[in-house]
Image: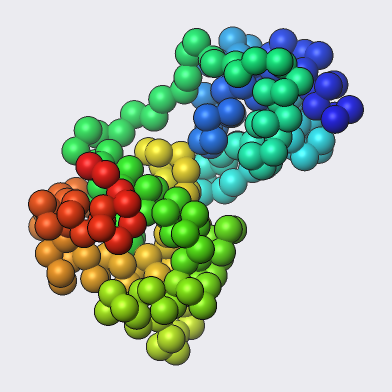
């Protein structure tokens, strides 16, 4: 509580925290635009927020993204402010339109649909809340779909992968690869040869809604 109160005492840090309240992850450069301060000043503020465990840093390749440490921080921030704060200007990522809905990320699915799928798997207890393992319920449910996850592999069964367009997590690891293969072989998706673009078929949308309550 004291750490949050200290953070809220500075207008620039408040802008940074409020920009992160949408649950997405953003770079220091993007946050500096929102806070209307220099990138070096933003880095200093982010360092203080990291030390106070108000934000966390995620490394994705050569990029670093920042997000709120937990949902409880967002709730606490809202309560201390007394109202639900909405930032007038949110950062936005420059992603080609055809890649927003669905695309490949290495050997797994990424994009808006993949993030919705990840959220559904966590909410319904198919994978752990941290996204690092498949639950017993999840193994049973995936097996019912025809996805065998008990095969020995050196790969991690499941891991959260930060989606660079949605700035939230989608499922990576062995599970992510299995899902992409399953979706394609069962004609839930169609891949554009030579490109990362993925098209969700009519059957795919029907099955995604049926099994995971994902709407188009």
Q: Horizontal and vertical percent for residue 19?
A: 57, 23
Q: Is residue 5 above or below residue 58?
A: above
Identify the residue at image location x=47%, y=19%.
Answer: 90
Q: Give the left or right position of residue 98, taking residue 168 as reference.
A: left
Q: 85 and 173: which one is in front?
A: 85
Q: 124 and 174: which one is in front?
A: 124
> Image quadrant for the N terminus?
top right
Q: Horizontal and vertical percent for residue 24?
A: 51, 35
Say if residue 127 shows up in the picture.
yes
> Image quadrant for the C terminus?
top left
Residue ranking furthest to the right: 2
Say if residue 195 shows up in the picture.
no
Q: Horizontal and vertical percent for residue 34?
A: 55, 15
Q: Is residue 158 above or below residue 203?
A: below
Q: Give the left or right position of residue 208, taking residue 171 as reference.
A: left
Q: Give the left or right position of residue 92, taking residue 96 as reference.
A: right
Q: Horizontal and vertical percent for residue 153?
A: 44, 85
Identify the residue at image location x=52%, y=73%.
Answer: 135
Q: 100 and 79: which one is in front?
A: 79
Image colouring: rainbow
Identify the residue at image location x=22%, y=33%.
Answer: 97
Indicate the quadrant where residue 186 lies.
bottom left
């Amino acid at each position: 509580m004291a750490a949050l109160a200290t953070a809220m005492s500075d207008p620039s840090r408040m802008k940074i925290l409020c920009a992160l309240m949408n649950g997405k992850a953003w770079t220091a450069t993007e946050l500096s635009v929102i806070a209307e301060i220099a990138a070096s000043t933003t880095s200093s503020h982010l360092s203080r927020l990291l030390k106070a465990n108000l934000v966390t840093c995620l490394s994705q390749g050569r990029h670093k993204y920042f997000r709120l440490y937990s949902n409880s921080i967002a709730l606490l921030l809202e309560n201390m402010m007394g109202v639900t704060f909405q930032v007038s200007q949110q950062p936005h990522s420059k992603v080609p339109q055809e890649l927003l809905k669905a695309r490949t990320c290495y050997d797994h699915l990424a994009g808006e649909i993949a993030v919705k799928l990840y959220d559904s798997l966590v909410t319904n207890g198919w994978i752990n809340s941290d996204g690092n393992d498949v639950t017993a319920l999840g193994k049973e449910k995936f097996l019912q779909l025809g996805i065998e996850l008990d095969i020995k592999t050196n790969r991690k069964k499941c891991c959260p992968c930060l989606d660079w367009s949605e700035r939230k997590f989608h499922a990576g690891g062995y599970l992510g690869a299995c899902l992409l293969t399953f979706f394609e072989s069962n004609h839930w998706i169609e891949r554009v040869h030579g490109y990362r673009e993925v098209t969700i078929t009519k059957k795919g949308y029907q099955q995604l809604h049926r099994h995971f309550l994902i709407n188009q």
